[in-house]
Amino acid sequence: MAAHVAKQAAARASRPTVSADVPILAAKITAPGVPDWAVPRPRITMLIAQGSRWHRLTVVTAPAGAGKTMALASWAAAEPGAVAWVGLDGYGNQPKIFWAHVVAALRRAGMALRTAPPIMRGRDAGHVFLLWLAAALAAQDPPVTLVLDDLHLMTDPEVLDGLDYALRNVGPGLRLVVSGRMVPLPLHRYRLADDLTEIRAGDLAFTTAEAGLLLARHGITLTADSLEHLTRRTEGWAAGLRPAAISLRRGSPPSPPSSSSSDVMYPAPVTFMSVPPHRAPGGAGAGGDRQLSRPGSARSERMRSSNPGRGLDSSMSSAPAAGDQPFVGPSARMSTALVTRWLLRLLPSVKALGGADAASRSGSA
């Protein structure tokens, strides 16, 4: 067994850190386009812009369907400075593929990097490559902003430790903006250095006015009370409001999905759970927290108390009205069938409320 482990370690050490033969997917290093129905949200764009301007690290953390990628894409489209974008997935969860796409994205953003990074082998190959990249980034003036979308999909220790090392040693030449359901970086270091901007689910939640604009983009106009009801019951959750808008435009709630339907309109299942602390030599948890906040932590409680009813990582803060059925909102484990049942209950109440508003107005006229 020991011989097998040693053989695997030797094989890993012999691999090049970044290989010129790694195929680069253009879609992975291109910021997604902003669709016509997207609502401009200057307050979110300003939060990201200020974070990337003044802090080395900006993190956008929220559950699936909260609008993280859309918020970053909208900001990137309006950002005058150089922005390198890498959309991450599970297949890139290894150093060679991860860093090849990072380098390609930086070059596409205008960084004067060599056509191909040096191909290095041996035990110190990873460290030498990171020194090379950090030195190149440190000389960047003006700084370049690197976006890593869906960083929670990166779990390889070499990837995460290398990213942390590079960020701590590039100086002012790099601004890193990351999104994810959690952020697997030792954020405590950047909090203590006052070099971190944190944008959470409560910030991304749609306000009533923003929800009205989203519905208007779909040709839907609700009364003030109906709009407030819809926003409150969805908690401003983007992946709840958009299907509701589509269903209202069609004039009927969504049909229950078949067993073969895929999660295209609705988010993939999400479960909120505690995330293991950052591993570090010398014992578990020695490196601090790699997640933005754990459910139930003091930091989460402060966020919920300052954003009542808006945090997607909290339970519904408003009690259901008399006669309401038990409500399952976006705080719970969401699947396609569950979200569909949720909208089937929600949309009739929105339509009924809108009808009651209209009747009340006509009766008082």
Image (tube, rainbow, N blue to C red):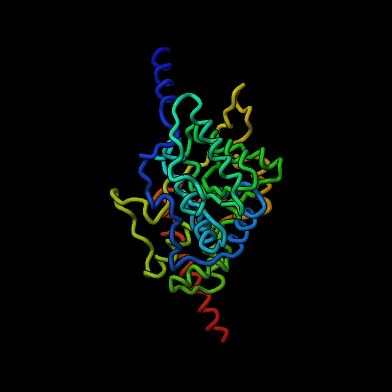
Quadrant (top left/top right/bottom left/bottom right) for the C terminus: bottom right
Describe residue 255's horizontal placement relative to residue 210 as left or right. Answer: left
Depth check, front residue: 210 or 40? 40
From this view, report whether residue 226 is shown above or below residue 20. Answer: below
From this view, report whether residue 103 is shown above or below residue 234. Answer: above
Quadrant (top left/top right/bottom left/bottom right) for the N terminus: top left
Describe residue 46's horizontal placement relative to residue 20 as left or right. Answer: right
Residue 78 figure quarter: bottom right
Depth check, front residue: 121 or 215? 121
Q: How many marks?
A: 0
Q: Residue at x 38, y 46 (%)?
A: 24
Q: Does any portion of residue 176 appear in the rendered image?
A: yes
Q: Position of residue 57 (x, y in %)?
A: 61, 46
Q: Position of residue 270 (x, y in %)?
A: 46, 44
Q: Position of residue 358 (x, y in %)?
A: 51, 78
Q: Residue at x 57, y 45 (%)?
A: 137
Q: Position of residue 269 (x, y in %)?
A: 43, 45
Residue 43 figure quarter: bottom right
Q: Residue at x 45, y 31 (%)?
A: 120
Describe residue 305's horizontal placement relative to residue 70 as left or right. Answer: right
Residue 135 figure quarter: top right
Depth check, front residue: 133 or 309? 133
Q: Does any portion of residue 318 appear in the rendered image?
A: no
